[in-house]
Image: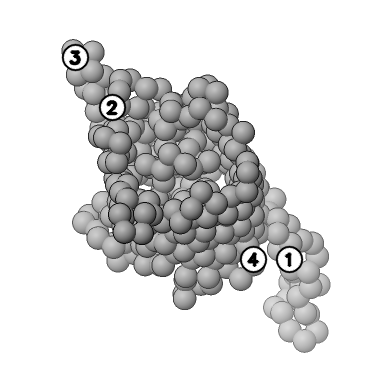
Amino acid sequence: MSKQKNFFKTLTAVICFGLSITLLSAEKYAGEIFKMGSGVRNVALGRTGLTDSESTSKAYWNASLLALQENASFEMMHAEEFGGNLQYDVLSGNIGNKSNMGFVVTRIGIDNIKLSKVPNTDSLPSNDNRPFAYKTVNNADYILWLGFGRQVNDKLLIGLSPKIVYRNIAEENAYGFGADISSTWLINNKFTAAARLRDFFTTQMYYENGTHEIVNPGLDLETSYAFQIPKIDKQIKVFINSEINFENMKDAATISSGMMSLDLHSGLEIILNPSFSLYSGYDIDHITAGFTMNYKKFNVNYSFEQNTELDNSHRMSVGVRL
């Protein structure tokens, strides 16, 4: 019992220290590339996933769940968002065989961006000095998460997800590194709670031109409850998630006070039969939906997110469980 108390004291000290040093110098919105989400299923569930033991992207959502992973699973996803201007590709996997390891690799890119200039740089653009495209460039972020999970006892799991970033913006490159820590509390066979501290001890971004960015930390909390509906004999699972940021987002967040803000996510899963599951969710201000179709070891996943301000998002993936 004393070992568990010492563990929680150490974990609390680490979290408090990481938050305190980060809030002194972090850059606002520097960590948005880490919030794109991973796993079509989890996006369809309103971007919940901390308590989702079925997710193939545990290294992203909650590495502590890898401690219970027995079978290997892999998923490949492609999405074109914001009218097809942004490409988002994800390869994720749980190694399985009780190795307690997983990975997620993402690419967020905008391709074929035209750079223009005028023939006479000493004059303003005009009919006689028309801008022309002299080259095209790609902007892309590549991120690798490595997940490691460990079971402390029958109820408690802990996890660590180191991450490495490579950024290419036009003709400028940057490199970054950081980590997330997570924990899961298995309350009973129906009720689960989890927490993830994003970018603890700060995530650092270094540009070749000398610029240095620090990513704000964030805290995610989630609970899920699974139950059976007797009359229709269908299994249902409900996910409730709160995303806490320290970026002084004010009106951009659902609830804000000073530096801290809170956004809400929720999801609902209905397992109609072993071959087909339906999802719906709420992602801050947007409605989500989707499904999974299983055939033997393979599965196809689809998610839809409604966004009237920018553009609706569609994601598809194929996966395999070994």
First along the sequence among labels 4 and 1: 4
Name the residue nearer the viewer: 28 or 233. 233
Q: Residues within 10 Å of mark 4 (few under 14, many from 20)?
A: few
Return the disc, 4 or 2, that comes first in the chain's sequence.
Answer: 4
Q: Nearer the viewer, mark 3 or mark 1?
A: 3
305 to 245, vertically: above or below = below
Say which of 36 and 153 sits in front: 153
- How far apart in space, not on screen, are marks 3 and 2 (Cα)? 13 Å
Q: Is residue 171 among what the camera can see?
A: yes
Alpha carbons under labels 2 and 1: distance apart: 54 Å
Measure the alpha-carbon separation of dots 3 and 1: 62 Å
The x, y position of residue 7, in whole percent, is 26, 19
The answer to whether 78 appears left or right of 131 in the picture is: left
Q: At label 2, which amino acid type do we have?
A: Lys
Amino acid under disc 1: Lys
Image location (x, y in percent) of residue 175: 58, 38
Q: Are marks 3 and 2 in contact (CB under 8 Å)?
A: no
13 displayed left or right of 71:
left
Residue linked to disc 3: 1
Residues at marks 4 and 1, CA–CA distance in whole angstroms: 13 Å
Write the residue at 53% across / 72% down.
311
Quadrant of the frame with the C terminus: top right
Residue furthest out toward the front: 231
**Crowd band around label 1 with a 10 angstrom C-alpha radius: few (<14), some (14–19), many (20+):** few
Looking at the image, do the residues carrying marks 3 and 1 touch, with CB atoms under 8 Å apart? no
Compared with 76, 164 (above or below) is above
Instruction: Tell me the number on the disc at residue 66.
Output: none
From the image, state whether disc 4 or disc 3 is nearer to you. 3
Instruction: Name the N-terminal-most of marks 2 and 1.
Output: 1
Residue drawn 58% across the image and 50% down it:
294
Looking at marks 3 and 2 on the same chain, the residue that comes earlier in the sequence is marked by 3
Q: Nearer the viewer, mark 3 or mark 2?
A: 2
